[in-house]
Amino acid sequence: MVSKTRNYAINIAIIVALFTVKGVLSDDTIPIPAAKTQLDSWFNSNVGPLEQRKSTLDPALVTAEAGAKVIKVMQDGSGDFKTITDAINSIPTGNTIRVIVNIGGGNYNEKIKIERTKPFVTLYGTPANMPNLTYGGTAKQYGTVDSATLIVESDYFVAANILISVCILSCYFNPNCI
């Protein structure tokens, strides 16, 4: 009898949770066109200009996008920073503007973490010379989640034209690394 009562209570709790949780619905009846020539028309019809949508967006996001800042990472020292980690560390805690970290081409062997306190970060690479982020951390060293090359905890994160590699091959030959 107790198990039936408990099951009933659990079922009621699940039903209440389903009806009270806010959901987001999307209208995918008009798919994104494959032809680049049709993309602008599709965007203007389905997304619309920012000015028309500002009232529907998070005010913090609108403010952040209006004051965007670009910092450059170049391994040869010609940018603001030589490493992505140094660039991320330069972003203040409680950041309120979009910070675009423009990353030059090359291999960046570093463990990158974007903390929850640093929202509005964009990692951007040039399409013709995309940067490759990689790190050889293992689950045995860091734990499963923290062994990732890139960990993002912050809100409003964007990445474009970035390659993220995983070093699995070394673990294949070394069963002790997992």
Image (tube, helix red, strand yellow):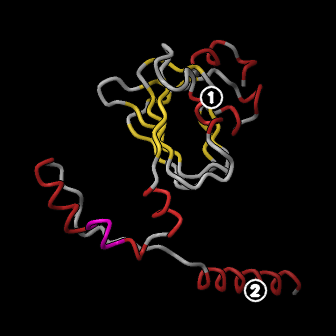
Q: Amino acid at mark 2?
A: Tyr
Mark 1 or mark 2: name the one nearer the start of the chain: 2
- Residue 93 to residue 78: above or below: below
Which residue occupies 75% across, 80% down?
10
Q: Is residue 114 above or below residue 83?
A: below
Quarter of the image for residue 21 reads bottom right
Q: Residues within 10 Å of mark 1 (few under 14, many from 20)?
A: few
- On the rendered structure, is 161 left or right of 140? left
Category of crowding for the residue at label 2, using alpha-carbon neighbours closer than 10 angstroms: few (below 14), some (14–19), many (at least 20): few
Which x, y percent locates residue 16?
66, 86
Q: Which residue is mark 2?
A: 8
Asked if 177 appears above or below 119 in the picture, the reply is: above
Residue 133, percent from left and from top? 52, 26
Tag 1: residue type?
A: Asp
Give coordinates of residue 77: x percent, y percent.
Answer: 51, 16
Farthest residue toward the right? Answer: 2
Circle 2 SS class: helix
Query: Callout 1: helix, strand or loop?
Result: helix
Question: Which picture quadrant has residue 49?
Answer: bottom left
Q: Nearer the viewer, residue 113 or 19?
A: 113
**Magenta span contains residue 50:** yes
Is the C terminus in the top left, top right, bottom left or bottom right quadrant?
A: top right
- Rendered image: mark on residue 86: 1
Tell me the residue at 44%/18% (across/down). 106
Q: Which residue sits furthest left? A: 37
Residue range highlighted in magenta: 47-53
For the residues labelled 1 and 2, the Cα–Cα distance comes to: 54 Å
* Left or right of 19, for residue 35: left
